[in-house]
């Protein structure tokens, strides 16, 4: 039963996806005698916490009730002290927590405080699921640089596009839907200049039946050399675009891009390139906790060479296009010896429509 209620807390927590970054996804389920008395989740940045909300439900007797939380409650001393007081006053008997809050600056050790008050606390129910859903928070709160997820779709013969650069669409509709869930979760989506030129993507989140949150669209382009009519340059309050350019971008280019409502962020070039580690430092300073890199080949090559990637998704479609000139997913300089290859860890596979999606971690 413990796992059943924790699964529900996880499900609820996911409802905050895209709306609470850089805070953690948090869900709460209140149970007494195996009956759910209340459910809540953190859905809007800065709103009341899921735990406090669920405990404020109704006037019924909560003595002996149990609380299921996917992550240790986070927040400042005043907020957590108030939560602990309510837990004590309402005589909650036991708290089940998926994972600890990794914030190195946390003002209160919630679990320790509860133990001092004699309130039972069990940590680690469905730990792996709880870790994964908040891997963005756990990374950013410690490192202050974005958690980087990369994804590409490729044909069975390992091509990102045909020899003419056509890549619409390699993977199935089902895989494309999967991608939109990733877009919903992150703060920013990043692609290279050529991808904008070749594919003219919108880079927004498109999902049915849920409230949408669009990531900030980031285009990496030294001199802002993208068509002025590109869809990513159609900007409004809910679809923002940032261009990461070199300091050497021309004044005229900068002005015409800014006039369309996009923001230009400038970085120094290093060996004729924009350094990905500098990009991630800058984005982290601007409060971006997660970046989802969607390609193309040159940008993925630079991302892997810089060592900034944490998680990889690859959709393999049962299609063969051939051609020596057709780009492969990860460009850049490449390595010389197979022994030096990046080997993904904690692998999993999923069949999505006719495609296979492989997920793995670099660290
Ligand atoms: N199947 C898929 O999942 C998928 C996804 C995306 C794209 N694609 C395909 O991939 C192809 C485009 O890939 P691509 O390799 O030609 O281009 P790209 O990676 O989209 O863009 C490369 C350009 O980005 C700029 N850039 C700036 N900083 C960079 C850095 N640090 N590292 C690398 N590039 C940097 C460079 O232009 P400047 O030097 O001018 O800045 C470079 O020429 C298209 O055919 C597209 O359809 C496929």
Image (cartoon, rainbow, N blue to C red):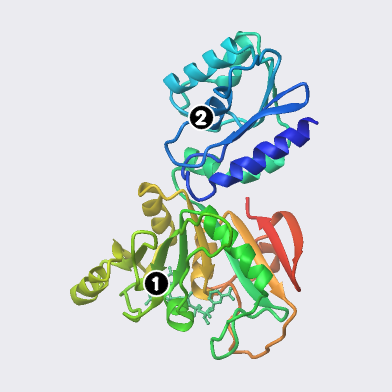
Image coordinates of residue 134 in percent, x first then y, are 58, 42
Total residue callouts: 2
Q: Is residue 305 visible?
A: no
Q: Position of residue 15 (x, y in %)?
A: 57, 46
Mark yes or no: residue 64 visible: yes
Q: Secondary structure at mark 1?
A: helix
Please state which of residues 180 and 31 is positioned toward the viewer in this rendering: 31
Locate residue 46: give its quadrant.
top left
Establish if 24 lies above or below 200.
above
> In this figure, which residue is indicated by the disc labeled 2?
74
Q: Who is closer to the viewer here, 336 or 304?
A: 304
Name the residue carrying label 1.
Answer: 232
Q: Residue at x 39, y 47 (%)?
A: 287
As drawn, the label of residue 349 is none
Side of 276 relative to 40 (left or right)? left
The percent position of residue 268, horizontal first and vertical second, equals: 30, 63
């Amino acid at each position: 039963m413990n796992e059943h209620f924790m699964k529900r807390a996880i499900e609820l927590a996911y409802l905050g996806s895209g709306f609470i970054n850089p805070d953690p996804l948090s869900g709460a389920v209140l149970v007494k005698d195996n009956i759910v008395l209340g459910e809540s989740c953190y859905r809007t940045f800065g709103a009341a916490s899921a735990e406090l909300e669920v405990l404020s439900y109704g006037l019924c007797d909560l003595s002996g009730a149990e609380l299921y939380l996917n992550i240790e409650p986070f927040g400042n001393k005043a907020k957590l002290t108030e939560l602990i007081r309510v837990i004590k006053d309402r005589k909650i008997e036991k708290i089940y927590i998926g994972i600890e809050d990794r914030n190195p600056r946390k003002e209160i050790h919630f679990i320790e405080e509860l133990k001092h008050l004699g309130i039972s606390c069990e940590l680690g129910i469905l730990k792996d699921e709880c870790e994964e859903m908040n891997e963005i928070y756990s990374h950013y709160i410690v490192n202050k640089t974005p958690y980087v997820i990369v994804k590409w779709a490729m044909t069975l013969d390992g091509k990102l596009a045909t020899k003419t650069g056509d890549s619409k669409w390699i993977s199935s509709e089902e895989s494309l839907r999967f991608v939109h869930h990733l877009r919903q979760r992150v703060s920013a989506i990043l692609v290279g200049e050529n991808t904008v030129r070749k594919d003219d993507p919108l880079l927004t989140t498109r999902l049915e039946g849920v409230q949408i949150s669009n990531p900030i669209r980031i285009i990496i382009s030294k001199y802002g050399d993208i068509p002025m009519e590109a869809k990513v340059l159609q900007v409004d309050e809910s679809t923002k675009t940032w261009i990461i350019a070199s300091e050497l971008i021309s004044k005229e280019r900068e002005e015409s891009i800014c006039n369309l409502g996009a923001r230009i962020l400038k970085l120094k070039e290093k060996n004729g390139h924009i350094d990905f580690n500098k990009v991630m430092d800058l984005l982290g300073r601007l409060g971006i906790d997660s970046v989802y890199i969607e390609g193309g080949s040159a940008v993925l090559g630079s991302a892997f060479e810089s060592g900034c990637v944490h998680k990889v998704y690859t959709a393999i479609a049962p299609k063969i296009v051939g051609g020596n000139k057709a780009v492969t997913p990860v460009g850049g300089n490449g390595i010389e010896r197979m022994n030096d290859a990046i080997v993904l860890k904690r692998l999993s596979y999923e069949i999505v429509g006719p495609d296979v999606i492989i997920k793995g971690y670099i660290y």
